[in-house]
Amino acid sequence: MSAPDDPRPRLRVCCAVIERGGKLLAARRPQGRQLAGKWEFPGGKVEPSETDEQCLVREVFEELGVRVEIVRKLKERPIAGSYICLVPFLCRLTLGEPQPLVHEALQWLAPADLPALDWAPADIPIWEQWLLERPSA
């Protein structure tokens, strides 16, 4: 477990909160990986030579085969008990239709459907923030 005064830098992991038509895209983690079967926002760790934004665009292309445009950065979330800091970005698709290239499944979810899935714990506050900040329908 990491202590608050731990001098080691946190591993930055960016994730894409892709919005389309008032719905969010969720991806189910594959078997054989940590948190297998849980739902998450797609993304991955930042490489030493890239910015958070470059990482996000690269990871989304690798995992979903699509291009996205970043709308804005959401609140960074250090993950309790680890050295990971989750960095979410609200995005919109600019090219292609998402494919589950590394995930078991993808699903577009309306706001009311978000709580029904078995989410990775770190992703829950992200969609909760989105629900609070989105324009009223």
Image (cartoon, rainbow, N blue to C red):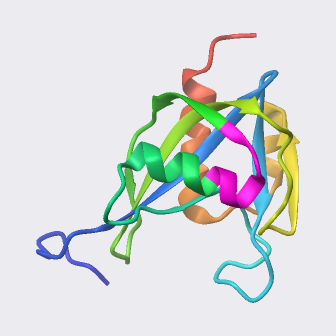
| Left/right of residue 66 with respect to residue 122 in the rendered view | right
| Left/right of residue 99 with respect to residue 131 in the rendered view | right
Q: Nearer the viewer, residue 48 or 87?
A: 48
Furthest residue toward bottom: 32
Q: Is residue 49 above or below residue 70?
A: below
Q: Is residue 23 above or below residue 38?
A: above
Find residue 71 and report its horizontal and vertical position in percent: 53, 25
Quadrant for residue 21, please give it.
top right
Q: What residue is at 81 percent from the left and 64 percent from the top?
A: 101
Find residue 1 and report its horizontal and vertical position in percent: 32, 84
Overall secondary structure of the magenta section: helix
Find residue 67 and report its horizontal and vertical position in percent: 68, 39
Q: What residue is at 72 percent from the left and 31 percent from the top?
A: 93
| Left/right of residue 65 with respect to residue 56 in the rendered view | right
Q: What residue is at 76 percent from the left and 10 percent from the top?
A: 137
Quadrant for residue 80, please give it.
bottom left
Q: Nearer the viewer, residue 6 or 72?
A: 72
Quadrant for residue 92, please give it.
top right
Find residue 18 and report its horizontal and vertical position in percent: 68, 37
Is residue 66 shown in magenta?
Answer: yes
| Left/right of residue 17 with respect to residue 24 in the rendered view | left
Is residue 121 shown in magenta?
Answer: no
Q: Does the image show residue 40?
A: no
The residue segment tinted magenta is 60-67
